């Protein structure tokens, strides 16, 4: 079994989102110094800190530790956002959105 590198995974997620450590610290409401010290000293974040980082990335702790590529996680996040909007629109608009999606899929 391969060892899961938490810091490497955080770095990959930052790359996927195009975020600096400063941006991640802002999004996660974590002090920037905490994040940079963690990276410089190669220390694993505490569970509460990791939960905040995951929340900023729009994923759960379990999703963080899944054997998924960061791009897949980003795609999954987009899908979750789409689903959250789906339930807020009328049935007529849902049908319209489906027809647009079908048309776009045919164009590819």
Image (spheres, rainbow, N blue to C red):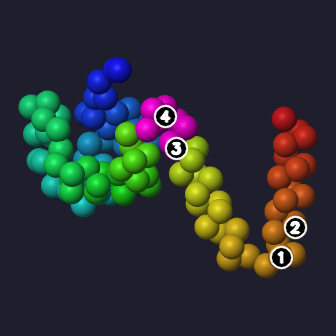
- Can you identify the residue that label 1 sits on? 91
Mark toward the start of the polypeptide (3 vs 4): 4
Q: Mark 4 points at which residue?
A: 68
Tell me if mark 3 has few (under 14), some (14-19) or many (20+) residues whose alpha carbon lies within 10 angstroms of its own.
Answer: some
Q: Nearer the viewer, mark 2 or mark 4?
A: 4
For image coordinates 65% across by 69% down, the residue present is 85
Per the image, label 1 sits on a secondary structure element best described as helix
Q: How far apart are marks 2 and 4 (CA)?
A: 32 Å
From mark 4 to mark 1, how far is it between C-alphas? 33 Å
Residue 49 appears in the figure: yes
Marks 4 and 3: in contact by CB < 8 Å? no
Q: For the residues labelled 1 and 2, say whether their Cβ atoms are less than 8 Å apart.
A: yes
CA–CA distance in space, label 3 to label 2 = 26 Å
Place of residue 79 in the rendered image (x, y in percent of width and height, measured from the top left): 62, 53
In magenta, the rendered stretch is 66-74
Q: Is mark 4 on a helix, strand or loop?
A: loop
Secondary structure of residue under mark 2: helix
Nearer the observer: mark 3 or 4; the answer is 4
Mark 4 and 1 residues: CB-CB less than 8 Å, in contact?
A: no
Left or right: residue 83 versus residue 24 is right
48 versus 11 height, above or below:
below
Q: Residue 84 lies in magenta, yes or no? A: no
Q: Name the residue under label 3.
A: 74
Residue 23 in sight from this viewpoint: no
Provide residue 48's location: percent of width, then percent of height: 21, 57
Mark 4 vs mark 1: in front: 4
**For the residues marked 1 and 2, what is the alpha-carbon distance in whole angstroms?**
6 Å
**Residue 78 — which label?**
none
Reply above or below: 34 against 82: above
Q: Is 6 rendered above or below residue 86?
A: above
């Amino acid at each position: 079994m391969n060892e899961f590198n938490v810091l490497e995974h955080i770095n990959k997620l930052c790359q996927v989102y195009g975020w600096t450590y400063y941006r991640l610290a802002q999004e996660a409401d974590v002090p920037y110094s905490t994040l940079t010290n963690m990276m410089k000293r190669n220390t694993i974040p505490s569970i509460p800190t990791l939960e905040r980082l995951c929340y900023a990335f729009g994923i759960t702790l379990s999703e963080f530790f899944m054997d998924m590529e960061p791009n897949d996680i980003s795609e999954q996040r987009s899908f979750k956002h789409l689903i959250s909007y789906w339930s807020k629109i009328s049935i007529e608009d849902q049908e319209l959105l489906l027809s647009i999606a079908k048309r776009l899929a045919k164009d590819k």
